[in-house]
Image (cartoon, rainbow, N blue to C red):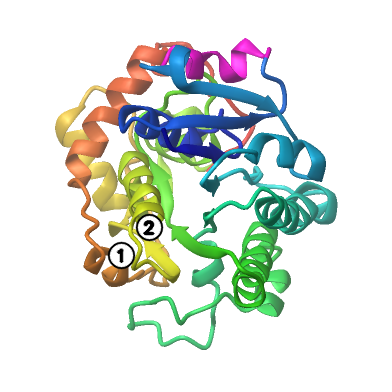
Amino acid sequence: MNRVCVTGAGGYVASWVVKLLLSKGYTVHGTVRDPCNEEKNGHLKKLKNAEERLHLFKADLLDYESLCDAFSGCIGVLHVASPVPGRHVSNPQLELLDPAILGTQNVLNACLKAKVEKVVVVSSGSAVLWNPEWPSDKEMDESCWTDIKYAKSLDQWYAVSKTLAEIETLEFAKQDDLTVVTICPSIVIGPMLQSTINATSLLLLSYIKEEGRSGGVTMENTERPYVDVRDLSEAILLVFENPKSEGRYICSAYSIRTKEFVAKMETVFPEYNYPKIFSEKSGRALLNSKKLINLGWNYRPVEETIVDTVKNYEEAGFLEKGKPFPSTIRF
């Protein structure tokens, strides 16, 4: 039976990847910081087939030997783990750059040692989007890269970390006998499997709960690119399994302005406290996923994502009246 390792298995995206792999018959190794932490990883043990085919390994991206142990016997590694920050990053080197860049180096070197056949590294749309030279009305494809200097000038340290890590990954792939593919998802939304809310889910929750908005009833009408977490998981497995996959792949389903997104939510769930005033925000966010679609990827309509996500938030208790916003981050 094929064994695949997923890094950061307890995270938002990785949890869905683990679930998908188990449903497809894979034996899954999952790296987590503490396998005994039920709050962060208990949901993984409840997944169908987890008891028989999921093995959690205590590992850290900055600990090469721990990664070697986790990757042993695996034909593939899906490197999903990477810190996603809140709004303010006090120490970019420690909080973002080291885990992303040194962590990716350790993952790739451990893959070589374990004789892994193929690696998928999950990068980010932020490694594409911050490019002031790209024409504003032209869709960004895989040839577009974030300008490091520009991103640093705007304190976009997450974008810097993901861009540098992806460049390192693709350079590594040229030099060594290892098949490596990268995938760049846009803002990932959709229902959660984990119990602690993640950064991109907070964004969607802020559309519904006024306490999550810095402007109260007012919000910027920003255009953002989105992808459903379940469609991203399918994309990660697609590029892993398809022998024709190569290089980098943008994974984004649609770009929508906040006002339109909120209108879609309000149509289905009119009872919540949505923003009423939208201040215009210039700038486009047009990501082109044609390369991935040509490989066989497809995605669900945004309306389905909205219904499933809000129901998930309701079940998790995030939308109960009087319940505080579950973060100090405001949008």
**Magenta includes 37?**
yes
Residue 41 is a magenta residue = yes
Left or right: where 263 falls relative to 10: left
Q: Tell me where the magenta segment starts and ends, as one range.
A: 36-47
User: Answer yes or no: do the residues labelled 1 and 2 have beta carbons within 8 Å?
Assistant: yes
Callout 2: SS: helix
Query: What number of labels is visible?
Result: 2
Query: Magenta segment, principal secondary structure?
Result: helix
Q: Mark 1 points at which residue?
A: 292
**Looking at the image, residue 255 lies above or below residue 136:** above
Horizontal side of 240 relative to 93 (left or right) equals: left
Q: Where's residue 105, x and y in %?
A: 73, 58
Q: Nearer the viewer, residue 217 or 120?
A: 120
Q: Where is residue 184 in the image (x, y as percent from the top left)?
A: 46, 61
Q: In this view, does 77 lie to the left or right of 259?
A: right
User: For mark 2, does the 10 Å Cα neighbourhood hold few (<14), some (14 to 19), or many (20 or more) residues?
Assistant: many
User: Based on the displayed image, in which of its 4 quarters is residue 268 positioned?
Assistant: top left
Q: Which residue is drawn at 55% across and 38% down?
A: 5
Residue 85 in the figure: left or right of residue 125: right
Residue at the image position 54 percent from the left and 77 percent from the top: 145
The picture places residue 92, in percent across and down from the top left corner, at: 79, 55
Q: Is residue 83 visible?
A: yes
Q: Report the mark closest to the observer, 1 or 2.
A: 2
Which amino acid, mark 2? Answer: Val
Quadrant of the snapshot with the N terminus: top left
Q: Is residue 102 above or below residue 292?
A: above
At numbered mark 1, what does the secondary structure look like: helix, strand or loop?
Answer: helix
Instruction: Note whether residue 63 is visible.
Output: no
Q: Mark 2 points at which residue?
A: 239
x and y percentages locating residue 175 in the rendered image: 66, 76
- For marks 1 and 2, give the CA distance: 8 Å
